[in-house]
Amino acid sequence: MKLHKMKDGVYMIPAVHWERRLFDSLIPLPDGTSYNAYLVEGSEKTALIDTVDPMKAEFLMEQLKDVKRLDYIVANHAEQDHSGCISLVLEKYPEAKVFATPKAKPMLMDLLLIPEDKIITVEDGETLSLGDKTLRFIHAPWVHWPETMFTYLEEDKILFTCDFLGSHMATSEMYATDECKVYESAKRYYSEIMMPFRTSIQKNLDKLKDLTIDIIAPSHGPAYNKPEFIINAYHSWVYDEPGNIAVIPFVSMHGSVKKMVEHLEGALKERGVIVKPFDLTVTDLGQLAMALVDAATVVIGTPAVLAGAHPDAIYATYLANALRPKAKFISIIGSYSWGSKAIDQLSGLLANLKAEVIPPVFIKGFPKEADFKALENLAETIAQKHRENNLK
């Protein structure tokens, strides 16, 4: 296959994984994914920026078969879907050196057994000349590991961001053309992977302000020849206030909790609140994560199971806590038969959320008139708090 030319001497090597449906044995991939490496040929030296997942090693090596010399391998990120083929590339080009941040060096040695003498560490702002092309290394910790960096090709104004600004999306197109589709994939990627590091992302977005960028080249999904599209999207997800939205992840075993959710949903809608319920027995957790990006309120619904919360509700609560969305308010609703510690159990899993806790509605058995009234009061409290915060 012919290399995908971006600019003179700059090529994308996109290893498209159309059929992959799960990442890290955790994250659903409804649209597959890709692992992008980039080849930069200067007048004197040649660099490979990132590699690909070992599952696509054969593709990478086929793309490199006519590359006679490789001087440098830039490891923007030590995670194996980008660094996993470095050792294989070093076998083909034994004179090449690996460039990485000081924090990435021990990770590459531990995860991939790369010899220490093959790795050169670079400081923030340090440059590397390829002759007529210059690479500038920009430390960008915690997007989404502590060792990550960007690489900026100064003459061609291309920013290689590895995971940052990427999307799990299999595509044959080099650049993002279907912006609606790419926006959804990028938002899913942000919500599942980047959202816990929102404050670090703010700092790293600020670093881009001083750069003139023609192309953003991430290591998942298409590149952006209109960089403002993805930068503006990230600014919105990171900085904007949450919307007038309540997300309700719930489980119902015998119908009681479902009835409570339906009543709460109706009561919130009557008060002008947008409601997004998620039945956790059938929910794509990526869709739930995306909804959490914009939600001002999260209400978890659960029945009692062995005096505790339902396992699916526990997992959803753990997920929300781990993702650290911008939600301002949180509550719990549910039903029990003979006893429950679900409220204490779920509350203890929410330490990372900087949200006000609204008193829960936890009832015995099937909801009765007084219980429906309590749900009405909960809806009114949520709507009032949204109004007080001018949420739209």
Image (cartoon, grey):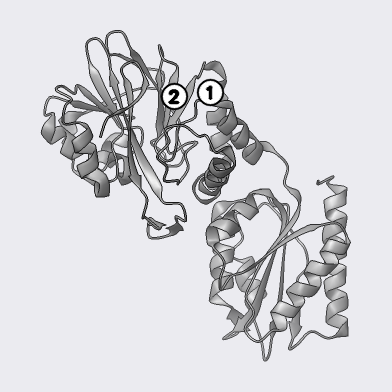
Residue 281 place in picture, x, y as percent: 56, 73
Q: Is residue 343 above or below residue 269?
A: below
Left or right relative to 388: residue 364: left
Q: Quadrant of residue 259?
A: bottom right
Along the line of sight, the residue nearer the viewer: 225 or 199 = 225
Q: Is residue 176 above or below residue 357?
A: above
Along the line of sight, the residue nearer the viewer: 184 or 258 = 184
Q: Nearer the viewer, mark 2 or mark 1?
A: 2
Residue 242 place in picture, x, y as percent: 72, 46
Along the line of sight, the residue nearer the viewer: 164 or 206 = 164
Rendered residue at 85%/58% (across/down)? 383
Q: Quadrant of residue 118?
A: top left
Rendered residue at 73%/42% (across/down)? 241
Per the image, the residue denoted by label 1 is 208
Badge 1: few (under 14), some or many (20 or more) residues near its Cα, within 10 Å? few
Q: Secondary structure at mark 1?
A: helix
- Quadrant containing the N terminus is top left
Left or right relative to 283: residue 11: left
Rendered residue at 63%/49% (across/down)? 293
Per the image, the residue denoted by label 2 is 159
Q: Secondary structure at mark 2?
A: strand
Q: Is residue 23 above or below residue 11?
A: below
Residue 93 place in picture, x, y as percent: 13, 29
Residue 361 in view (yes/no): no
Q: Residue 304, which numbered label?
A: none
